[in-house]
Image (tube, helix red, strand yellow):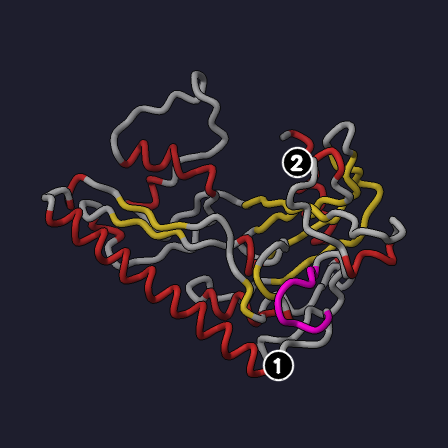
Amino acid sequence: MGCWQFTTGCPTIEWLSKGPAHAWDKPASPESTRSLRHAYYSAAAFSDSLLGELLGEVDALGRRMDTAVVLTADHGWGLGEHNHWIKYTTWETDTRVPMMLRAPWATAIVGKRTAALVEHVDLYPSLAEIAGVPVDKTLESIDGESWASLLDDPAAQHKMAAYSQYPRCWPANVTHDASAFVNMARCSGVDKHLFAYMGFSIRTADFRYTEWAAWDGAALKPLWNVSAGVELYDHTADPPESAKDSFERFENLNVAAAQPATAAKLSRQLRAFFDAH
């Protein structure tokens, strides 16, 4: 299964035509793919070098044993998986980000990985706890939960689900109906009241489920009964330690129609979460 393969059964509103792909079902040329991946991996290698310089300076200042260092990002990046490039989707490629921690005094996690689900909103309470700083959620506006306990037991669970969302806007000079879904635009610079649809996604240990609901700009909430499509991807055999496998192999087939009970269960969970927030 080539990593350029488009996702079978995916609603067209998910795929965004950014990058070198010719169409949702027509991949970029091998030459373009090779060149762009080469550039991306070069940038990653340079970033790795800079991180080494940073950690070396922390050590040189004598602060290694009292300084926690976190490496993360604000989004993932598509490199041709699912015939998708850049970002701007709710797929695993775009919503899963690196999260690496150096806390040398936490010896139980040195050199280890965890498959626990965490979210960016968890970062502040986690680092505060690691640093011994009290966090009072009754006095501070904090949605996240500390994952500091994973430093003692990397095999433990943290959250049962992680949530994300991303909007779609109407492209210029088109009829505002389903015929435009394959050409939907980014919402960069568009007022949130004018979004057309919003993709809401929930990731559990075994599945990713997404609903594309029409956006009620006046109320700033989804219209769940007006849908541009749903997606369900089965990650039950996904090795969590291999992002490459996750990105290339496990979101190539939308199984929402084949697993209606799972889709319905995750739909209820997703809607309850976003309606409450």
Which of labels 1 and 2 is toward the front? 1
Real-space Cα separation, disc 1 to disc 2, in angstroms: 39 Å
Query: Along the polypeptide, which appears first: circle 1 or circle 2?
Result: 1
Residue at which label 2 appears: 274
- Mark number for residue 29? 1
Instruction: Tell me the kind of residue under disc 1.
Output: Ser
- Residue 127 image-quadrant placement: top left
**Residue 264: image location, x then y, percent:** 74, 49
| Range drawn in magenta | 15-23
- Mark number for residue 71? none
- Residue 250 image-quadrant placement: bottom right
Above or below — where is 15 with respect to 70? below
Above or below — where is 188 with respect to 205? above
Q: Is residue 225 left or right of residue 250?
A: right
Above or below — where is 175 with respect to 2? above
Helix, strand or loop under label 2? helix
* Residue placed furthest toward the bottom: 30
